[in-house]
Image (cartoon, rainbow, N blue to C red):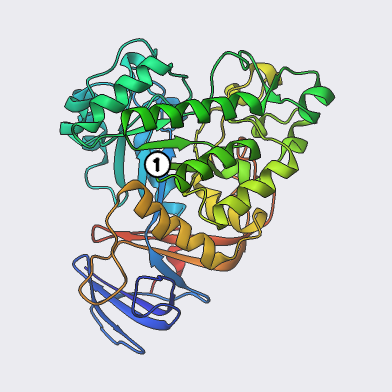
Amino acid sequence: MKILLKSARITDVESPHNNTSKDILISNGRIENIATSITDSDAMPLSIPELHVSQGWVDFKSAFFDPGFEERGGLTQGLDDAALGGFTHVGVLPSDHPSTDTKLAVEYKRRMADGHCVQLHPIGAITKQQKGTELADLFEMFQAGATWFSDDQHPINEGILTRALLYSRDFSGKIIFTPRSTNFTHDAQVNEGMGSTRTGLKGDPSLDERLQVIKAIEIASYTKSALHISGISSKESITPIQQAKAAGLPITCDVHLMNLCFTEQEILDFDTRFKVLPVLRAASDRVALIQALAHGVIDGVVTDHRPYVLDDKQVAFDEAAFGAPQLLTAYAALLKNTGLSSDQLVEQLSIKNRTLFGIPSNPIQIGAVADLTCYSPTLSWELDSSSRDKACNPFAGKTLNGRAIGIINKGIVMLNHPEHVG
């Protein structure tokens, strides 16, 4: 199959064609030609005003809840949402039922994703059933294709983290640590501060996150292991990470989309669409996170995509599930709320996230694999009224500017706007 992108602005700092507008001819999954003007009667043309193209975007923190909770959409729907959100690679969390804590569970996810244009990267559980008491067989999952391991929102203690780091180091497995415990935060619902004072709900202090970050860094130093810390939400957590990096420790971290876009102000009217983990914090935290991302202290941005059915969210705030669907609106949400430019965000999603999560780069050049995201930074839109995400998505009802047009990957095209083909 041949695809011809017409007058596409190339946004790829690794490409010799960066910041130029070119026609791009793709044949059998590879870039056959890049030129000012290309004509090929056998190719399917894609022409849209303000068409931009970059290396495919990467999200490495999505929950599809499959197997066990297929009513929330399942793996295929999750991969479709990733594609329509512009992501060619997605790391899928182990929070299923049963948990992804065995070789067979990893193989199931990989098999379900065969033939899809999005590359699924299964994340294995650190402990059996994510209970935090006994290590899962990390090496067996590694052999099945899981290179990253996480217990997601479940806290893990110092002993388990130490053993996981030592064990995974022998086969180059990667441990993801979530900086939260139940010492301070059992039944916490909102940020400790204005959020808890104004709502009367139990507060989650940023102190807990900072203590967990410091603990994790010390254990990583002790075990001489690389460690990824996921979901930084408070300004107090940034300094110890910055200091660890300055000391040469192999510490990396990411921030959730919601913590870059919103603050605790959003939950004062008990809107459960904004009930997420980590909780939304103060305005000063959000500003500090954006600055830390811009300066490279925070390495990656993840969506923490978690789809739910209405019954999970349209209940009293303290009974509602934590999380929200994010994949479809991720680029537009970041563009609208962070103050970062489109080019900065695209470099983060396409290049920096690839580097962080070990996904090979495919610069846009002749002969390269076509692993591409097509997008428009100016397209104005809202979630379709029929969208399954609309009732639970924090951005529903808001006019968004900037949208993924679709992706090209594995020789497959998946578009939001098929009317622009031809």
Which residue corresponds to the image point at 47% horizontal and 36% vertical from the top-left? 230
User: Which quadrant of the figure has residue 323?
Assistant: top right
* Residue 338 image point, x, y percent: 64, 55
| Residue sitting at the far top | 133
Q: Residues within 10 Å of mark 1 (few under 14, many from 20)?
A: some
Residue ID at (52%, 29%): 214
Q: Residue 220 in the image: x percent, y percent?
A: 38, 31
Q: Quadrant of residue 190?
A: top right
Residue 200, position as x, y percentages in the image = 80, 18
Res 155 seen here = yes
Q: Work out whether 60 lies above or below 293.
A: above
Quarter containing the C terminus:
bottom left
Q: Is residue 164 left or right of residue 49?
A: left
For the N terminus, the image quarter is: bottom left
Q: Residue at x 39, y 14 (%)?
A: 132
* Closer-to-camera residue (396/133): 133
Q: Residue at x 42, y 69 (%)?
A: 53
| Residue 218 against residue 329 in the figure, above or below | above
The local secondary structure at tag 1 comes to loop
**255 horizontally vs 99: left or right:** right
Front residue of 413/59: it is 59
Residue 378 point in image, percent of width and height: 60, 69
Foreground of the two, 358 or 271: 358
Residue that extends furthest to the bottom in the rendered view of this protein: 37
Q: Is residue 385 above or below residue 163?
A: below
- Judge whether residue 333 can be spotted in this image: no
Q: Going by the image, does 316 lie left or right of 321?
A: right
Q: Amino acid at mark 1?
A: Leu
The residue sitting at the right extreme is 198
- Residue at image mark 1: 249
Query: In the image shown, does 147 or 4 lie closer to the viewer?
Result: 147
